[in-house]
Amino acid sequence: MTVKLTVLATGGTIAGIAGSATAKDYSAGQIAIEDYLENVAGLGLSAELSAQQIANIDSADIGQGVWNDLHRATLAALGDPECQGIVITHGTDTLEETAFLLDLTLPVHKPVVMVGAMRPADAVGYDGLRNFANAMRVAGDGEAAGRGVLVVMGDRIFGGRDVRKVRTRGTEAFRGFPRESVGLVTPSSLEWFGAPWRAVGEPRFGWVDALPEVVIVAAYSGLCGEAVARCIGPDTRGVVVAGVGEGNMPEAARRELVRRCAQGLQVVRASRADEGLVDAEPDDAANGFVASRALNPAKARILLQLLIASGETERAAIQRAFDGR
Ligand code: SIN
C-alpha cells in the first residue's frame, strides 16, 4: 500500500546550490520543494508526497517566526487523517534546536522525521537524496510513532532530544547523547534499537508564539563579571552557561550570576564539552543554579525558554524538568 506523507520544507543545504560540482562555497535554501520532489520522484519510492514550503533559508536564520509556521503546519498534518507521517527538511546547523523544540511541543502519535544534508544538491556525493529517501522510509513506518521527533542523517536515526551536530563538514556530522542513535536506516532497510518509549498523548509543553529571551554565555579562562553582565539585557529571563568541564565557570562569573539569580534570573549550568552529564552540585541550591544534565547549551536554552514561558519559576522544579527525560 502506498504511504501518504506530508513534506514541510524550510531550506538548508539539502536545498542548497553551489553552481559547480566541486565548489566549496554554496548558498543554502535555493531549491523549491516542488522542484526537489521531482528529483525524489526519480528514485521510484512508493510514497505519495504532498509538500508545503514553510521557508527556504539558511537554518542560522530560523527563529520564532519560522518555528510558529512550522509548528502550525506540523500540527495540521498530524490532525489530517490522510497523512501517515511527516518529513521536515531543515538546515543542519540548528536542526538540533528545532528538533528538540518540536519534540517537547508536539503530540507523537504519527512519525515526525527531520532531515538535512551536509553537501549542496549539485555537489559530487550529494547526501541529501539518500537522507531524504531514508527519512521517507522512517516516516512511513508505524513503529516510528511514539519515539518523539526523530532526525535522520547519515543512515542513522536519532532522538530529537539526543541529537547534536558534532562536525562542521562531512556526511557523518551528527551524534546522539546520551543515546547514540535509536535505529539504522537505508533506502532498503530499517532497524530500530528497542521499542517506542514515549506514551502517546498530549505534548509536554503548550506552544508559545513568543518565547522569552534566554541567552547562552560561553565560559572561558578569565571570564569576568562585567562580561557576563553585558550579555544580560533588560528582557533577559534566563542564562545558560556553556561552562568549562562539568558546567564550571570562573568565580567572578559565578558571583555575578548568583547576584542576578537573587533578582529572579534563571541560570542553567551546561558544558562547552561535546559530551557528558552536568550533574547538580551541593552549591547549586545556594547559588540558585540548575544543572543541565544531558542537554547541551543550545538544547538547555530551549527547555529553559519553555519552562519560563509556562510560568515555572521554582529552582527545584526547573531542576526536575532537566533531570527528566
Ligand atoms: C544550514 O544550516 O542551513 C546550512 C548548513 C547545512 O544545512 O548543512
Image: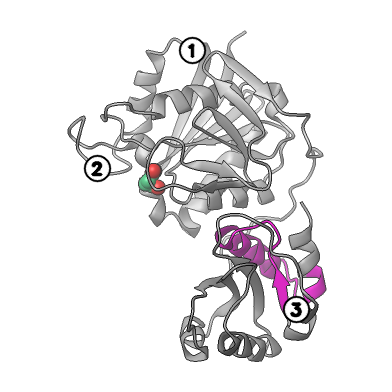
x, y percent for residue 223: 49, 83
Query: Mark 2 or mark 1, which is nearer to you?
Result: 2
The numbered mark, 3 or 1, whose residue comes first in the sequence reads: 1
Which class describes the residues within 10 Å of circle 3: few (<14), some (14-19), or many (20+)?
Answer: some
* Tag 2 residue: 26
Q: Quadrant of the N terminus?
A: top right
Is 245 situated above or below 325? below
Viewer-side label of 3, 2: 3
User: In x, y percent, where is residue 272?
Assistant: 54, 64
Q: Please tell me which residue lies in front, 168 or 263.
A: 168
Q: Amino acid at mark 2?
A: Tyr
User: Pointer 1: residues within 10 angstroms few (<14), some, or many (20+)?
Assistant: few
The residue identified by callout 3 is: 284
* Up-down relation of residue 183 to residue 226 (above or below): above
| Residue 3 visible to the viewer | yes
Counting residues from the start of the chain, the first of labels 3 and 2 encountered is 2
Amino acid identity at mark 1: Leu
State the separation of the CA atoms marked 3 and 1: 53 Å
* Residue 292, placed above or below residue 74: below
- The answer to which quarter of the image holds residue 280 is bottom right
Q: Which mark is residue 45?
A: 1
Q: Which residues are magenta?
A: 289-317
| Residue lying at 61% horizontally and 52% vertically, measured from the top left | 101
Please state if 113 lies on the left or on the right of 31 as rendered: right
Q: Nearer the viewer, residue 143 or 286?
A: 286
In the rendering, at what x and y percent does residue 70 appear?
52, 45
Indicate the quadrant where residue 238 lies.
bottom right
Residue at position x 21%, y 29% from top? Answer: 21
Q: Is residue 57 visible?
A: no
Taking the magenta stretch, the answer to whether it contains residue 314 is yes
**How was this image coloured?**
one colour
* Beta carbon at label 1 within 8 Å of ligand 1: no
